[in-house]
Image (spheres, helix red, strand yellow):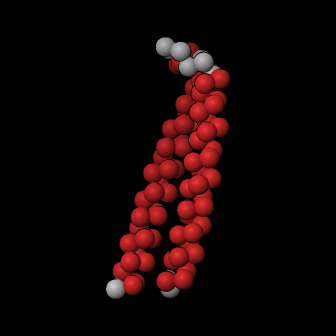
């Protein structure tokens, strides 16, 4: 890949990361509304919210890793 293609892909990943972070605010509000309480395992809505939260954290980690790898490639191309 050329430097320009890598930079374009990086820009797309950064935009996706920003959208992903904004979506977390929605998930946080759902967690508040689901009344997590001491034992949320009996609350079906709370279970769904926690699953969304877990998936969000996994995707966030993947995005950060991809962004870091692209930045390394771009830096290597500059040298």
Q: Is residue 78 left or right of residue 12?
A: left
Query: In the visual, does 35 lie left or right of 75?
Result: right
Q: Is residue 66 visible?
A: yes
Instruction: Please say if 69 is above or below 53.
Output: below
Q: Is residue 48 visible?
A: no
Which residue is depicted at the point 60% across and 18% down?
35
Number of numbered markers: 0
**Residue shown at 40% from the left, 84% from the top:** 77
- Front residue of this view, candidates 44 and 49: 49
The one nearer the camera, 16 or 47, is 16
- Residue 16 in the image: x percent, y percent? 60, 58
Q: Is residue 49 above or below residue 78?
A: above
For residue 24, what is the image quadrant? top right
Q: Which residue is rendered at x = 47% and y = 64% of the image? A: 67
Left or right: residue 36 versus residue 30 is: left
Is the residue 12 above or below the residue 28 in the image? below
Which residue: 49% across, 83% down? Answer: 3
Quadrant of image for the C terminus = bottom left
């Amino acid at each position: 890949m050329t430097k320009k293609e890598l930079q374009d892909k990086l820009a797309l990943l950064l935009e996706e990361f920003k959208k992903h972070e904004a979506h977390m605010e929605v998930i946080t509000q759902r967690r508040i509304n689901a009344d997590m309480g001491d034992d949320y395992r009996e609350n079906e809505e709370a279970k769904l919210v926690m699953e969304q939260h877990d998936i969000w954290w996994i995707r966030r980690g993947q995005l950060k890793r991809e962004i870091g790898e692209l930045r390394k490639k771009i830096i290597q191309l500059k040298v």
